[in-house]
Image (tube, helix red, strand yellow):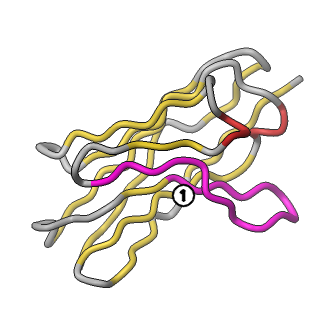
Amino acid sequence: QVQLVESGGGLVQAGGSLRLSCAASGSVFGLGAMHWFRQGLGNQRELVATATSGGGTSVVDSVKGRFTIWRDNAKNTVYLQMNSLKSEDTGTYFCLAFLSGRSYWGQGTQVTVSS
């Protein structure tokens, strides 16, 4: 079993920054790709960024140039640095990880951007 715990969310003004963290614990040997998703009120959950176990990273076009993802394999933690935040970035941010063909979700952390 893998447990994921997100942190770092909060209330920020438009143009501000936040850094999210997602720490994996439990049976994490061989942990695969880790992703950040978000879900705004009334919206579907959408992929925001991905960090592979080999160091590859990607972000979706809507956050490109503003968000950066990276992971620290020694700490089994993935981070999401969010700069130049916009009101449309508001939502609950979830961490997803894969291990041995199974997927694991964190409980989410709320990000609210005030305009």
| Number of marks in the rendered image | 1
Is 97 part of what is drawn in magenta? no
In the picture, residue 111 is in which quadrant? top right
In the displayed structure, 101 sits above or below 31; it is below
In the displayed structure, 9 sits above or below 91; it is above
Is 49 part of what is drawn in magenta? yes
In the picture, residue 9 is in which quadrant? top right
Which residues are the magenta region? 36-52
Q: Is residue 69 left or right of residue 94?
A: left
Which residue is identified by label 1?
94
| Mark 1 residue type | Phe
- For the point 45% across and 56% down, the residue is 35
Quarter of the figure that contains the C terminus: top right
Residue 64: percent from the left, percent from the top? 63, 32
Quarter of the figure that contains the N terminus: bottom left
Q: Is residue 74 left or right of residue 99?
A: left
- For the point 55% across and 42% down, the residue is 59
- For the point 39% across and 38% down, the residue is 79
Which residue is most to the top? 15
> Which of these two is toward me, 20 or 68?
68
Question: Dot 1: what SS?
Answer: strand
Q: Residues within 10 Å of mark 1 (few under 14, many from 20)?
A: many
- For the point 10% across and 67% down, the residue is 29
> Which of these two is toward me, 9 or 70?
70
Q: Is residue 3 left or right of residue 79?
A: left
Residue 72: percent from the left, percent from the top? 22, 39
